[in-house]
Image (spheres, grey):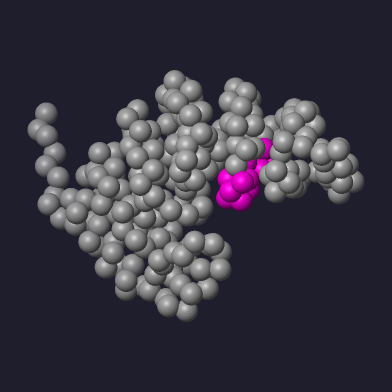
Amino acid sequence: MRKKVKKKNLAPEEIAKKSLALLKGKANKERAMKAQKYFKEEIATYGLSAQEMEDLGKELYQTIKEDWGVDEAIELCEILLPHPFQEAKGLAIFILAKYWRDFPKNLFFTIKRWLSRDYCDNWALVDSLCPHVVGSLLEQYPELVEEIKEWAFSQNRWVKRASAVSFIKLARQAKYLDTLYHISSTLFSSDDDLIQKANGWLLREAGKRDVQRLEKFLLNHGPAIPRTTLRYAIERFDEKRRKELLVRTRSS
């Protein structure tokens, strides 16, 4: 069979240049200034809306899907993730996620390198990358579940947050709950509010699968749980039960 020759204008370097040009062309300074209020750390953004980002991601994917494989998508991430602007990183993640069926196992370790180098340096980027991409890797390669437990001990806040949010979608499956609760209890010692909020989000999702197990977990750990984490975890309970849990988990 004759091997398909990729078009030169579809090389990752060219798509990266095209992406940046399109983003600059859609830049909105006013919206960029408003976006900053959602982040404690300073971000660089062109000010595109979520809909504009989705439309642009789909447009770019249509130009490459017949010629690219996962290797090219990973290469695009290597080019765009170090870029300072939020949307450039976001486009790379969007395209990478399209190739989830073909993810190689070593992408897991590549992603940890990206996180460790602060390429995804805010909650929005970590939450875009991890539930879909890392979550898919954990499903495809079950042995990586043990590896990601170590991420919860990382000194890097983005690696640490990733240990939680990578299980957001997997929390719907009972087989991941033991690992999920193990990671959650590991994160209780963190005083970083971005970790505490991510942990609470994770527990809330676990509660959708098994609410009784969540209650038991919260009562067993009680005072060890940061109050921010606890409040996020119990958001789906009715008001009376929330108040009861806040009291019963308070330190004496």
Compared with 152, 228 (above or below) is: below
Q: Is residue 128 left or right of residue 220?
A: left
Quarter of the figure with residue 5:
top left
> The N terminus lies in which quarter of the figure?
top left
| 203 falls in the magenta region | yes
Quarter of the figure with residue 143:
top left
Expressed as whole percent of the image width and height from the top left, the position of residue 162 reads 49, 41
Expressed as whole percent of the image width and height from the top left, the position of residue 17 reads 22, 61
The one of 125 and 160 positioned closer to us in this rendering: 160
- Which residue lies at the image location 56% right of the left edge and 38% below the top edge? 164
Compared with 147, 234 (above or below) is: below
- Which residue lies at the image location 52% right of the left edge and 34% below the top edge? 152
Q: Is residue 3 left or right of residue 123?
A: left
Point out the stretch of residues depicted in magenta.
Answer: 191-204
The one of 133 and 63 positioned closer to us in this rendering: 133
Name the magenta segment's main secondary structure. Answer: helix
Expressed as whole percent of the image width and height from the top left, the position of residue 67 reads 22, 44
